[in-house]
Amino acid sequence: MSENRHMAFICSKGNLDMAYPALIMGWAALGNGVDVTLFFTFWGLDLINKHRVDHLEIAPVGITSMKTGMMGFPINIGIPQIAGVLPGMTAVATTLMKKKMEELEVPPVREMLQMLHDAGAKIYGCKMTVDMMRLTKEDFLDVVDGVVTASEFIDLTEGAQIIFI
Amino acid sequence: MAVSVLANVSLNEEGFLTDPSVWNEEIAKALAEQEGIELTEKHWQVIRWCREAAAKTGASPTLRQITTGTGLSTKELFELFPKGPAKKVAKIAGLSKPEGCI
């Protein structure tokens, strides 16, 4: 394994289920001695937004892979898409997913970001989306190293393996 | 020193002991030296805790289990064992490669 392997994750999604892939793989990479950079853009900014990070959700609508078994029912069948639009379904799915993650000892997103930061990962927000959403540095968690342009991100990740999520 | 202690010790291709029962503190020191780490009392605390945890659960502890169990912060653990603490501690402590994701 080369000493300076570097992985960069572009996180563009703000749903609870799409928050974890980069965090878990990034953590595994750090555990293997690989340098890690995380770049949050568009909806992904919710993950590093201190007002939003504890309120990420998973909406059952559009997730055709979601089955009743994941919700704790004994029979594992598909959930009709129409059921997903009922009031409260997003809250139910979110609560269940958080519970499942806790059972697996996976920390909440805020804590995982702190772990990644403490382990040496670099964390950036995307300048264009930050401007578009009228956010400022004060809206972000302390673990954020800065807000950078796409071009700066390209410079910062020279030679890295880039993964878009 | 590392060379002489490890001369008769069999390691797998990733550097883990093939027979964990041969582990002793001299081997740990030599393995650490190979990783460029000089073991201090703090290192030993982590190594001992990991060996106890592994004896109890049968598996090498993950990074997060180490920080939760020893009370060390993530930062401290990465400073003690740079570039992949869980794997490095497991190696030095004569345990198998950790398998958990977190």
Image (cartoon, coloured by chain):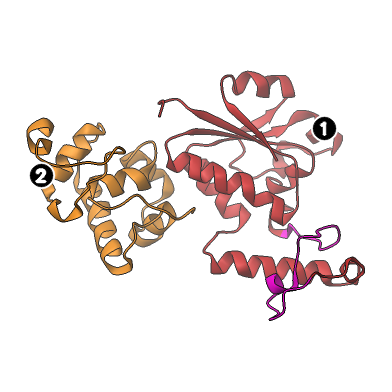
Chain colours: A red, B orange
The amino acid type found where label 1 is placed reads: Asp
Residue bearing the label numbered 1: A131
Magenta stretch? Answer: A55-77
Q: At which x and y percent is residue A51?
A: 73, 52
The one nearer the camera, A34 or B45, is A34
Q: Residue at x 69, y 48 (%)?
A: A47
Q: Examine the image and state in which quarter residue B14 appears.
A: top left
Q: Please identify, in this view, whether the residue under mark 2 or under mark 1 is nearer the observer.
A: 2
Regarding mark 1 in the picture, which secondary structure is present there?
Answer: helix
Q: CA distance from mark 2 to mark 1?
A: 57 Å
Regarding mark 2 in the picture, which secondary structure is present there?
Answer: helix
The one nearer the camera, B30 or B47, is B30
Q: Is residue A52 left or right of residue A82?
A: left
The one nearer the camera, A84 or A123, is A84
Q: Is residue A91 left or right of residue A158?
A: right
Residue A113 in the image: above or below residue A84: above
Q: Is residue A126 left or right of residue A119?
A: right
The one nearer the camera, B98 or A23, is B98
Q: Examine the image and state in which quarter residue A96 appears.
A: bottom right
